[in-house]
Amino acid sequence: MSEIPLKPLGKEDIRKLESALLVMSLFSPETLEALKNPHERLTWIDSLYTAAAAFARDKAGMPISSIADELGVTEATIRKHLRGETKAGQLVLKAYERLSKEGFKIELPGELTSAIVTEDVSKLREKIERVKKLLNDALKELSS
């Protein structure tokens, strides 16, 4: 994976930082816990995206008015996210601090990790069974 710029210089750098902040914030234990609440689910992703996008653009030196225009939200919303006055802003700020100290790193919670591993193991077992069948068919064909 390419380097995530902490001080983006152009649109591509902004996109990289924005994406890293969004993913790191989304998979934080706090966010995953909040997403369990069905009343908060609808607004969380949008708020996290807006906060991550605003933060990345702010780090690139864009004026708040330009950020607000580009993201289609008010300047007040942008300021609240950047000052950490919103939960999404707080999560993105924590993600940026982690990113600057540790680099891009995501730790999936145990229940997600085990679900992914179980799915992968099942897929591998299916593939192995198909290969066994093909080998048996080939052996039968060679024997006759």
Image (cartoon, helix red, strand yellow):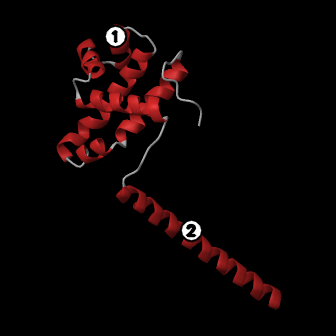
Question: Could you tell me which residue is drawn at 48 percent across and 23 percent down?
Answer: 6
Frontmost residue, 72 versus 86:
86
**Three-letter code, disc 1:** Ile
Closer to the N terminus: mark 2 or mark 1? 1
Could you say whether the residue bearing mark 1 is in a helix, strand or loop? helix
The residue that disc 2 covers is 124
Q: Position of residue 56 (x, y in %)?
A: 42, 21
Q: Residue furthest bottom?
A: 144
CA distance for labels 2 and 1: 50 Å
100 left or right of 140?
Answer: left
**Three-letter code, disc 2:** Leu
> Considering only vertical position in the picture, is 61 above or below 90?
above
> Considering only vertical position in the picture, is 112 above or below 76?
below
> Considering only vertical position in the picture, is 119 above or below 107?
below
Frontmost residue, 13 versus 90:
90
The residue that disc 1 covers is 64
